[in-house]
């Protein structure tokens, strides 16, 4: 069995969640959010939730995340729903990735179910871009 590469050995749950988010955004995920559920649940620290435009896009997002993390020797404990492509769940212990087909996401409303969980920007650049967009909107 291959060992985890040294540079990924000390990755925190947040770093792994942001890495999943980066891969997903590179693969054109929509409506991506990271929720910190630590303290709200005992089985995970972060949820990464996103939508795909079609079942094939959902499958592609899951495959991209799985392949890129696998190349870094980070493997999931479980992956469910890949065949159907409506809701794929990938379990990385501290991070659970939820990839939804758009209508399925609306139906299950995990964002609303975990509304108490703090939302975390996928990375500092995304947070800065959001702040800049907000400033431009207020000036107009």
Image (cartoon, helix red, strand yellow):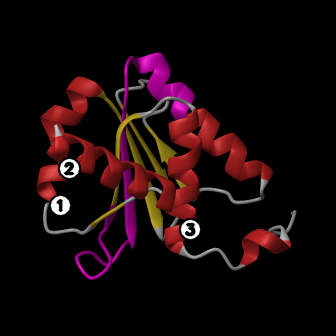
Residue 91 showing in the rendered view: no
Q: Which residue is disc 1 drawn over? A: 114
Q: Is residue 105 magenta?
A: no
Sequence order check, earlier mark of 3 and 2: 3
- Image quarter in which the N terminus is found: bottom right
Q: Is residue 44 magenta?
A: yes
Say if mark 3 contacts mark 2, CB within 8 Å: no
- Residue 50 position, x and y percent, is 37, 40
Say if mark 1 contacts mark 2, CB within 8 Å: yes
Q: Which residue is disc 3 drawn over? A: 15
Q: Which residue is disc 2 drawn over? A: 110
Residue placed most toward the observer, 121 or 99: 121
Sequence order check, earlier mark of 1 and 3: 3
For the point 45% across and 27% down, which residue is it? 58
Residue placed most toward the observer, 98 or 124: 124
Left or right of 111 in this view: 57: right
Say if mark 1 contacts mark 3, CB within 8 Å: no
């Amino acid at each position: 069995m291959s060992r985890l590469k040294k540079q990924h050995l000390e990755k925190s749950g947040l770093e792994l969640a942001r890495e999943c988010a980066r891969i997903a955004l590179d693969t054109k995920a929509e409506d991506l959010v990271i929720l910190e559920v630590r303290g709200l649940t005992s089985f995970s620290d972060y949820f990464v939730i996103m939508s795909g435009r079609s079942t094939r896009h959902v499958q592609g997002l899951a495959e991209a995340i799985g392949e890129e993390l696998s190349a870094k020797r980070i493997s999931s404990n479980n992956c469910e729903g890949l065949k159907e492509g409506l809701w794929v769940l990938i379990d990385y212990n501290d991070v659970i990735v939820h990839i939804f087909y758009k209508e399925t996401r609306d139906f299950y409303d995990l964002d609303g179910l975990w509304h108490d969980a703090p939302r975390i920007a996928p990375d500092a650049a995304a947070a800065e871009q959001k702040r800049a967009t907000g400033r431009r909107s207020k000036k107009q």
